[in-house]
Image (cartoon, rainbow, N blue to C red):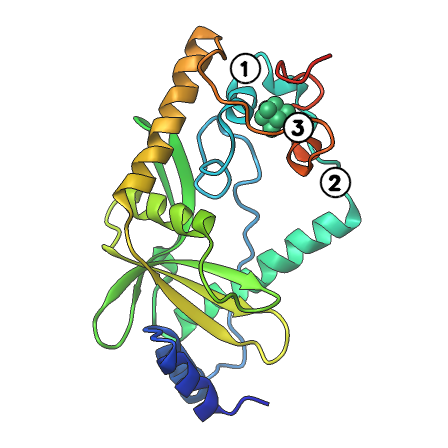
Amino acid sequence: MSSFLERTLSSYQRNEVITPFIEEALVKADWPDEYPVKVYNKERKFDGYFHPSSDPTAGELALYYKFHPDWRPLLQEERPTPTLEMTFQIGSAFHAIGESMMIHLGFTTREETEFPFRNEERMISGTTDIRTLTIPTGRKFIVDLKTCNQLPKEVSESYAIQLMIYQDNVPGAPDEMAIIFFEKAYPHKIRDFVVKKDEVALQRVYDKFSKVRVAIGKSDTSELRTCCNGPGTNEYLRCPARNFCERWAK
Ligand code: SF4
């Protein structure tokens, strides 16, 4: 079992800035007999906007088919299965526990969590987990919470860009960004990563979204890059446009 001291020491050694405060607050908290945990099933419905959680890493042609009104109805979405739904619901519930704990421990408020935004100019929408989380030193972060089976050693590029897009588009978001991971399995470790803004990477995503929008406006895919290596590859097999994609049509 990880003792409180071991956990706190290791988070300091990893230069974490938020986790030591959370761990301290956890053991000092005056836990009430009950407190609300609100589970959100967000961002599952198509609203015609690019979403920071899924679209920055998608291929140009895949985005074209996803957003083009003529092709979208033909997409073959993944069929729901009990396992898929359970995975989603359990993940959402754990996520909600993390968010509710941050509120109860005084790091944020209900008004700052699940903060929706929409940028009409860039056609981006989403909901950020915590717009402002404040640690006892006064530092403020926009935070994305992630649940995981095992704590990662680093932040993936897709998670980092997701948070950067939130920070860049959510009105009133602090400059500093962090991702906090909660381990679903015992001993439920916590780890935070501070994310630095990468203007070049951010602009690359905005340029891709613009390029896709121009192509949709002209119904012309000629400028868009092919985004998989065709039948037999995982990317192809997972793509909802695989049955009609012009690049691989027989
Ligand atoms: S089948 Fe491949 S190339 Fe075509 S849209 Fe899907 S991922 Fe992109």
Determine whether the beta carbon of the residue marked 1 sits less than 8 angstroms from the nearest atom of ligand 1. no
What secondary structure is found at the residue carrying circle 1? loop
Percent coordinates x, y for residue 188 in the rendering: 57, 76
Determine whether the beta carbon of the residue marked 3 sits less than 8 angstroms from the nearest atom of ligand 1. yes
Q: Residue furthest right?
A: 82
* Ligand 1, image quadrant it occupies: top right
- Cβ–Cβ under 8 Å for marks 3 and 1: no
Percent coordinates x, y for residue 213 in the rendering: 41, 19
- The residue located at (60%, 90%) in the rendering is 1
Cα separation between marks 1 and 2: 23 Å
Can residue 224 be seen in the rendering of this structure?
yes
Q: Is residue 111 left or right of residue 93?
A: left
What secondary structure is found at the residue carrying circle 3? loop
Q: Which kind of residue does numbered mark 2 sit on?
A: Pro
Tell me, for residue 69, which label it has, or none: 1
Residue labelled with disc 2: 80
Q: Which kind of residue does numbered mark 1 sit on?
A: Pro
**Location of residue 4 with respect to 75 vertically, above or below:** below
From the image, state whether disc 3 or disc 1 is nearer to you: 3
Q: Residues within 10 Å of mark 2 (few under 14, many from 20)?
A: few
Determine whether the beta carbon of the residue marked 2 sits less than 8 angstroms from the nearest atom of ligand 1. no
Of residue 128 and residue 106, the one placed in the foreground of this image is: 128
Percent coordinates x, y for residue 18 in the rendering: 35, 73
- The residue located at (48%, 38%) in the rendering is 57
Task: Quarter of the image for the C terminus: give it.
Answer: top right
From the image, state whether disc 2 or disc 3 is nearer to you: 3
What secondary structure is found at the residue carrying circle 2? loop
Residue labelled with disc 3: 240
Q: Is residue 79 left or right of residue 53?
A: right
